Image (cartoon, rainbow, N blue to C red):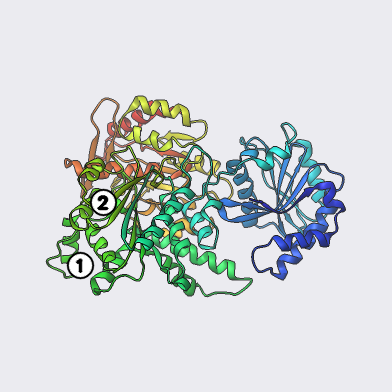
């Protein structure tokens, strides 16, 4: 893939006609060209031909950043330095948003572009009419420098200063150009990129160490094509480790197969209310912003459109109760399918909330029945996250298999190849006893986490930590600690400051806690307080309701299926891990802690912490309060046990 609209040796760029360069940029531009963009390119070309005169190296215009579906204005490689230049043509000041944008692009190159891993990278923000400028005062540990703020007059001076302080060997431009790009977008970034027309191959990693998301997406599209050709109904199960990109696969399928003109309708369904609301809002905001300069669109219109792309599974289910007709969509993707309700929970809900007294189907059975109303073909894709059931009544994937086997044997079943019983319990037993058509497709299992791009073994580490497999946990910690910072503290202010020091640019951070962490309230962390997850996840640093302020606490119900760059996990004694004593499971009610004895409820609590521990992409700090023996609900010894256990493994 050609990553830049235009690239050239600097010497050739200096001598080339500006009109020829502009023509190359316009030809490569994939969208309607706005006059503002054309004028910006003209000024950038003129300024850079003057500012780069006599320098060795190469220049790139509109260099693709696949993770976020955007482009760096200009990259200059000269000597041993890489300059990532963001222009604000006509601006008379360097605003904070543009500053963070310039830094974000530099960090993206550092983290995801192999050829940039060991380079000094200098983000440069050029507000062409600005009066105040600022050089690069310091270098971060990873080789990314603080943002240089320049203007049209001082750009060459700043470039010369940068080249004097850059460290390391001269960059091999040939090797840099052919090196791989391994983006790992957040689910919000991925949804926006796919929704705006990018391909999953543009925003997913392509290294041989992981089953490529593109391969999984193509396997699902082939299954749909086969179902249409053979006029059969098919259900597919897609599994993967936490953060492997299952939801990304679902988003890609929903966006690429949904074509109303061709009467193709697909939708991603999720029972995760916060996830649905956040993605709908993010897509709507993004479309409104993209349309500002061409064909402005109202927020309400954009939001309605986004809601046809991703919907709440309960609304889909309720529509099926009102009518005997098949759904509009013939391809449905159920995200977090393991969280669908079992028979008892569904029957209770239908009776008390919907006035249906004798409802005798589990949620998986009813959802399959809805799609079974189609006369010719239909496809159901279940995205399965093993070990993430966090609510009473969540059936796990076994309920889907039971419904297929007992009620819908005529459906064809496509299963992943996975060795984890946690992903699909009784998989082998199902295959041996199912009388219908089934096949195992290796591409339907995603083996590597994309959330923690710094280390793929992070989810394995936290699993060992929770299960008290201390030998494995200690071994894995030694493997991840240099790339995935972890710390344990007893001081909440220290935890907040640690995160603020780690996060750069627009990297998102926030405080998490279990919904059962009832006594964190004594430390100003109220898990019962209402938060708006949309504002918490999407709003900017200046908004007190955003995660950045670390005032509102998100629980597992707010963050499942989503991720942040850095997290602080506040750990209460509801889940008491100990070096020498059995794990204690508790719930806080009224004025005291009560022991959880039911094994299923213990599993739910363990999974809550599994979810919370795997939300951070880049690193995390765990805060364990000190306790207070004058308060019977906060015994010091219990908090000390948790701290001692964590410190026996996480040695900082």
Instruction: Classify mark 1: helix, strand or loop.
Output: helix
Per the image, the residue denoted by label 1 is 353
Taking the spot 51% from the left edge, 59% from the top edge, the residue there is 194
Look at the picture and state if 191 lies above or below 591: below
Q: Is residue 581 above or below residue 71?
A: above
Image position of 164 (left or right of 354)? right
Q: CA distance from mark 2 to mark 1?
A: 18 Å
From the viewer's perspective, tell me whether residue 63 is left or right of residue 427: right
Give the residue number, with chain letter if any, for mark 2: 391
Q: Residue furthest left?
A: 358
Q: Quadrant of residue 153?
A: bottom right
**Height in image: 410 above or below 442?**
below
Q: Residue furthest front?
A: 230
For disc 2, the neighbor class at 10 Å (few under 14, some 14 to 19, many from 20) is some
- x and y percent of residue 479 in the render? 47, 28
- Considering depth in this image, is 150 or 280 the residue closer to the camera? 280
- SS for callout 2: loop
Corner quadrant of residue 448: top left
Residue 165 visible? The answer is yes
- Percent across and percent down for residue 451 are 46, 44
Residue 367 place in picture, x, y as percent? 26, 62
- Which residue: 76% across, 48% down? 59
512 sits to left or right of 55: left
Mark 1 or mark 2, which is nearer the start of the sequence? 1
Q: Is residue 129 visible?
A: no
**Which residue shows up at 85% across the image and 58% down it?**
17
Residue toward you, 215 or 111: 215
């Amino acid at each position: 893939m050609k990553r830049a609209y235009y690239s050239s040796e600097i010497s050739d760029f200096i001598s080339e006609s500006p009109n020829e360069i502009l023509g190359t940029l316009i030809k490569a531009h994939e969208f309607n060209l706005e006059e503002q963009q054309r004028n910006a390119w003209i000024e950038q070309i003129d300024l850079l031909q003057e500012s780069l005169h006599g320098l060795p190296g190469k220049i790139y215009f509109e260099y693709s950043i696949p993770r976020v579906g955007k482009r760096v204005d200009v990259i200059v490689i000269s000597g041993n330095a890489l300059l990532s230049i963001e222009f604000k043509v006509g601006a008379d000041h360097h605003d904070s948003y543009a500053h963070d944008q310039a830094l974000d692009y530099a960090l993206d190159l550092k983290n995801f572009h192999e050829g940039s891993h060991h380079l000094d990278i200098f983000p440069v923000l050029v507000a062409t009419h600005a009066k105040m400028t600022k050089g690069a005062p310091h270098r971060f540990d990873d080789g990314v420098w603080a943002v240089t703020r320049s203007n049209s007059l001082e750009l060459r001076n700043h470039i010369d200063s940068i080249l004097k302080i850059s460290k390391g060997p001269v960059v091999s431009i040939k090797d840099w150009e052919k090196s791989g790009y391994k983006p790992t977008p957040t689910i919000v970034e991925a949804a926006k990129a796919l929704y705006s027309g990018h391909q999953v191959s543009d925003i997913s990693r392509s290294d041989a160490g992981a089953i490529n998301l593109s391969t999984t997406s193509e396997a699902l599209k082939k299954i749909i094509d086969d179902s249409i050709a053979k006029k059969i109904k098919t259900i597919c199960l897609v599994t993967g480790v936490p953060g492997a990109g299952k939801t990304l696969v679902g988003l890609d399928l929903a966006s690429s197969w949904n074509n109303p003109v061709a009467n193709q309708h697909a939708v991603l369904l999720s029972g995760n209310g916060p996830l649905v609301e956040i993605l709908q809002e993010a897509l709507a905001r993004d479309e409104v912003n993209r349309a500002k300069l061409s064909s402005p669109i109202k927020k309400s219109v954009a939001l309605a459109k986004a809601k046809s792309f991703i919907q709440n599974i309960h609304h889909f289910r309720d529509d099926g109760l009102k009518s005997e007709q098949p759904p509009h969509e013939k391809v449905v993707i159920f995200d977090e399918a393991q969280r669908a309700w079992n028979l008892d929970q569904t029957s209770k809900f239908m009776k008390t909330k919907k006035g249906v007294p004798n409802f005798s189907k589990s949620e998986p059975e009813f959802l399959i029945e809805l799609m079974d109303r189609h006369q010719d073909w239909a496809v159901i894709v279940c995205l399965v996250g093993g070990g993430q059931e966090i609510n009473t009544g969540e059936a796990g994937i076994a309920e889907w298999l039971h419904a297929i086997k007992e009620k819908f044997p005529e459906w064809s079943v496509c299963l992943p190849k996975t060795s984890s019983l946690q992903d699909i319990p009784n998989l082998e037993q199902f295959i041996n006893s199912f009388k219908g058509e089934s096949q195992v497709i290796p591409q339907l299992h995603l083996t590597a986490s994309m959330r923690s791009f710094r280390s793929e073994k992070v989810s394995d580490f936290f699993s060992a930590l929770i299960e008290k497999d201390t030998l494995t946990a200690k071994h894995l910690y030694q493997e991840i600690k240099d790339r995935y910072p972890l710390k344990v503290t007893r001081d909440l202010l220290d935890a907040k400051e640690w995160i603020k020091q780690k996060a750069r640019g627009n990297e998102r951070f926030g405080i998490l806690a279990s919904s059962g962490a009832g006594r964190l309230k004594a430390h100003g962390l109220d898990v019962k307080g209402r938060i708006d997850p949309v504002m918490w996840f999407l709003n900017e640093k200046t908004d007190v309701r955003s995660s950045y302020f670390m005032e509102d606490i998100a629980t597992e119900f707010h963050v499942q299926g989503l991720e942040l760059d850095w997290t602080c996990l506040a750990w209460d004694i509801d889940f008491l891990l100990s070096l020498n004593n059995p794990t204690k499971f508790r719930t806080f009610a009224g004025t005291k802690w009560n022991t959880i004895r039911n094994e299923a409820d213990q599993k739910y609590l363990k999974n809550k912490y599994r979810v919370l521990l795997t939300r951070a992409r880049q690193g995390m700090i765990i805060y364990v309060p000190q306790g207070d023996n004058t308060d019977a609900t906060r015994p010091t010894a219990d908090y000390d046990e948790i701290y001692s256990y964590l410190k026996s493994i996480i040695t900082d």
